[in-house]
Amino acid sequence: MNSCYFSMFPILFLVLLSSSWATLAQSHNKFLHCLSSFHSEDSSSISKVIYTPYNSSYSSILESSIRNLRFSEPDTPKPLVIVAPLHASHIQITIYCSRKHELQIRIRSGGHDYEGLSYTSEVPFVIIDLVNFRAIDVDVENKVAWVQSGATLGELYYGIAERSRTLTFPAGVCHTVGVGGYFSGGGYGLLFRKYGLAVDNIIDAQFVDTNGRILNRKSMGEDLFWAIRGGGGGSFGIVLAWKVKLVHVPATVTVFTVSKTLEQNATKLVHLWQYVAPKLPHDIFSSISFRKVNSSQDGQRTILASFHSLYLGEVDELIPLMQERFPELGLRKEDCTEMSWIESILYFRQIQNGTMDILLDRSYKTTLVGPSFKMKSDYVKEPIPETSFTGIWSKLYDVDAEFVGISFVAYGGKMDEIPETATPFPHRAGNLYKIIYNVGWKEKDNIKSQKYLSWIRNFYGYMSSFVSKHPREAYVNYRDLDIGLNNKGNTSFEQASIWGHKYFKKNFDRLVHVKTMIDPKNFFKHEQSIPPLFS
């Protein structure tokens, strides 16, 4: 080839780039025209909730719910349009216009997707931000509530607590998480050993499908109602609201955190915990968090294991129970604190001197993970040998990230009693505990981000012999694209099965069947969405 051919490359690239931008701009304008062409009592206000890059408030709306700054870089793909609907008709119109002009939709309720899939895409896309869908209607007499998908867990807890001190909903401790995404993936929390997951306590829903129909449990049918309760967000349609059962909690609960270093026999205690915690009474939540610290004795590095628990009752009941079941921990009355259920959320969130009003703060920034982070999950079915923890501790020493650690969350209790096919969430009986891996960093350490990502991937690889196998299971709400992802175009059942069976086990096949029935053309899709059978 002659040099003249190569000299044409920059020109050809610019022509193609200009053409691409022109096509994109045209699509953007047609989409906006489509939105504005609808006029009804509800849809007349849609212009007030449309944000484009030309609006001064576009960036603030986009960034308001980005919880992982790994996906807020200058080169991160941005949406052509953000729609923050006020009415169901706004969502129906956005779906119609997106289908007509072949734009993908990303659905955001709280922005906590660990891989940023609710607000990023490699192809032209629109965000439906449910921030205005936050109504909560609590019926104390019948012990039920309706909650819209854009509400946070904190807003749900607050709404219930305003009306009852002894009713709540079994969900997580991160109060800024959006209800829509959390429920879509299963949702575990402090009460899951007592009452099961969030999805085990959902009894109805309002849902918009790919054709814009608004359906409830009866009209959508049991297969779709099953799929949306744990099958992952962004695959089937948009859930507007959920009807949930409220559960009883005592007026007083007891919490404790007991921390031990390796020099204080932590390794032996952790090994014993594996046998004890999954068999504790349903009224106890138990977990361990691990991080490296400097020893108070000689300043050398060591591992601090912190044993955390919530007991649904008073301290005088808890102490003899723990002395019988786990005397090696040495729990004392002075280690424990009695409080209300709602206060325990702040305790486990490590919010000190906070009032209940902080549950309404959607912008609250936690100090438990870094502004940028990567997380992974595992399930353990057999106790890890005591001698093997030495290798695990060495892995924690190998990284210098500011936010790094692992956690064990005990299973058992109610989770052993619910069949793994009851909802798409399959991680039930047979699991001793879940492992959560985390590495996080601040902006000043972005230059080391690849080093941190390599560390957590290597750590995850190291743990393979200690965790579930065939498949190696993972929790869909701890989204992890390392375990597999779909093509940007059509995805085969075989390809999606790589990650699908890790999240859902044999339930993945049923999810694909439901997807094929409700969205055969695969309109609602992302890098780990359920594909239809013939996509």
Image: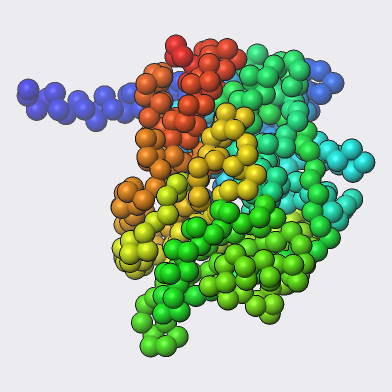
Please indicate, yes or no, whether residue 400 appears anywhere in the rendered image: yes
User: Residue placed at 75% from the left, 71% from the top?
Assistant: 316
**Residue lying furthest front in this view?**
324
Between 122 and 243, the one nearer to me in the picture: 243
User: Residue placed at 37% from the left, 21% from the top?
Assistant: 494
User: Residue placed at 58% from the left, 54% from the top?
Assistant: 279
Q: Where is residue 472 in the image (x, y as percent from the top left)?
A: 39, 39
Q: Where is residue 66 in the image (x, y as percent from the top left)?
A: 56, 47
Q: Position of residue 40 (x, y in %)?
A: 81, 18
Task: Relative to 493, say whether 476 is above or below.
Answer: below
Residue 520 as seen in the image, left or right of residue 187: left
Residue 217 as seen in the image, left or right of residue 488: right
Between 135 and 363, the one nearer to me in the picture: 135
Residue 367 as seen in the image, left or right of residue 462: right
Q: Could you say which quadrant of the image residue 438 lies in?
A: bottom left
**Residue lying furthest bottom in this view?**
298
Q: Where is residue 384 in the image (x, y as percent from the top left)?
A: 39, 56
Please indicate, yes or no, whether residue 119 appears anywhere in the rendered image: no
Between 44 and 17, the one nearer to me in the picture: 44
Residue 457 as seen in the image, left or right of residue 195: left
Quarter of the picture containing the N terminus is top left
Quarter of the picture containing the C terminus is top left
Task: Relative to 327, say whether 208 is above or below.
Answer: above
Q: Could you say which quadrant of the image residue 410 lies in?
A: bottom right
User: Residue placed at 60% from the left, 25% from the top?
Assistant: 227
**Residue lying furthest right in this view?**
141
The total of numbered circles placed on residues is 0
Q: Could you say which quadrant of the image residue 281 lies in?
A: bottom right
